[in-house]
Amino acid sequence: MLNKSIQTALVLLFFSTLAQASVPYAKWTKRPKLAVVIVIDQCRSDFLTRYESKMSRSKTGGLKMLMEKGAYFPFARYDILQSMTCPGHATVLTGAYPYQMGIPLNDWYDVNAKKEVYCASDIDAPIVGRDAKPEEGLSPRKLGTTTVGDELKTAGLGTKVVGIALKDRSAIMMAGHRADLALWVEDGQWVTSKYYRPDGALPEWVLPLNTNLKKDRPDENAMATPFGVRATTLAAIEALRKMKLGRNSRTDILAISYSSHDMLGHAVGLQSPKMEEMTLAENESIGELIRAIDKEVRLQNVVFAFTGDHGVAPPVDVFKPLGLPAGYLENKVILEELNQHLETKWGKSEKGKWILKARSWNYYLNPEVIADRKRDRTEVENEVKARILSGPTVGGSRDGVKYVFTRTEWENRKLPPGQFERQIMKTYIVGKSGDVVIIPKPNWVDKGPFATHMTGYNYDASVPLVFMGPGIKPGVYGEKAEVVDLAPTLSFILGTVAPSGSEGRVLHEILQ
Ligand SMILES: [Zn+2]
């Protein structure tokens, strides 16, 4: 027979376990009036952990507030093959992997049209706000699934959805198909496209922002400095005020991405003191944003979600001299050598080169040459793969190859093991991904900027994930979390169906 105090303890334990597994109904049905989704572009997890003590000295820092007052997953992940801005931002509010939401890369190659395709390009949606060439235009039409905002709007809830970022693809992918507005910067000015403004005019309230940008911008590179961070915050605050977000009974969505961090990060690398300066500036600027939101809407009516779109690799020129394995795996060099090899083996064709393009280690075969020389695709894929794996090393390049897989191997599900197979299955799209794809060894990158991000390894895929607001239990969480969990968790909080391609889980442990 258990004594009374043990019995009481067991009963209490039972009820406290129950309490953890559920949310009080009355609390859950009290929906936030505004959901603010903040992304820092290239925010690898340790940008927050490394500068945490310096941020703590600030009383007004927004990143510090998110970490302290929010439910903070310091090391959330993207489980995709290639970490980049467009796939990252397309994940945030769809909760979907690229194979479903349709954006495996920033840009890819269309072998039939013989042209490069940008993830947000759309000639039918010309730019509004500057003189655009006729072939230029941008929209979310290549996004194959819905966002949280799309679902709220489609449910007839009268939600307003706005996306703001210096980079067009970031604003557009988060704003989704049915956005009221997406704003981004071209030639130092805020612009949008006819997709959002069929009348071809910028909203009136954007014009003073542009006048100020012209007046205040110190130089051409200003967007890759804290100036770009502040410009983004100011535009978000103006959108909040002028579009009266969070002023009605339904939930509005404001999605903001800070692109400056990535622009600078590519140029100087994550170890540079300039990145510390940038992160501390973001801390202050996001603090200003949160205070403006509090003033307009009151924080008890707002749910915040924060994450990064990808991480970054340590620069080879910094990493390698330390004796760590790293190097360059150059698309262009490998492409040339492969084309030469195929011409020697099977002859030249009037139809052009055997391989049309190499983009981010995706190699696109030329179907016309394959037909002209009477080979078949699988045979050519296999030859290219074998040549990459065992051909001559070109400028040290081949040393960095971990695996190579082909379209046919993807079709037959004969793929590299472990995380690679999983990430390929979540990412690969026929017609967008290459016919042959290289997976590099860790810390091998293509030549280009000083630092870059292009893989599914931890350094590229690890980002913070934070939720903050009423009903969210603050704390640091060690549970496995992925960025695909953000959208279904937000949908749960807002009482709506998760987006169409969402495969994440509801992070129920953060709800109280
Ligand atoms: Zn980048």
Image: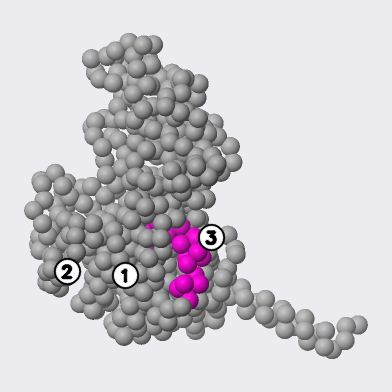
**Left or right of residue 246, residue 328 in this image:** right
**Left or right of residue 458, residue 500 in this image:** left
Q: Which residue lies at the image location 56% right of the left edge and 70% below the top edge?
A: 476
- Camera-nearest residue between 462 and 8: 462
Q: Which residue lies at the image location 56% right of the left edge and 74% below the top edge?
A: 475
Residue occupying the far front of the picture: 321
Q: Which residue lies at the image location 53% right of the left edge and 45% below the top edge?
A: 322
Q: Could you classify mark 1 by the number of other residues whose Cα lies within 10 Å: few (under 14), some (14-19), or many (20 or more)?
A: many
Which quarter of the figure is the C terminus placed in?
bottom right
**Residue 204's x, y, as percent?**
11, 71
Q: Which residues are magenta?
A: 39-56
Residue position for label 2: 216
Amino acid under disc 2: Asp
Q: Could you classify mark 2 by the number of other residues whose Cα lies within 10 Å: few (under 14), some (14-19), or many (20 or more)?
A: few
- In what element is the residue under mark 1? strand
**Left or right of residue 135, residue 364 in this image:** right
Q: Could you classify mark 3 by the number of other residues whose Cα lies within 10 Å: few (under 14), some (14-19), or many (20 or more)?
A: many
- In what element is the residue under mark 3? strand
- Camera-nearest residue between 318 and 260: 318
Residue 378 visible in the picture: no
How far apart, in angstroms, are the residues tagged by discs 1 and 3? 24 Å
Residue occupying the far right of the picture: 1
Residue position for label 1: 254
Q: Which mark is residue 75?
A: 3
How far apart, in angstroms, are the residues tagged by discs 2 and 1? 25 Å
Which quarter of the figure is the N terminus placed in?
bottom right
Of circles 3 and 2, which is in front? 2
If you read the primary sequence from the N terminus, does the residue marked by circle 3 or circle 2 appear first?
A: 3
In this rendering, the count of numbered labels is: 3
Amino acid under disc 1: Leu
Residue occupying the far bottom of the picture: 4
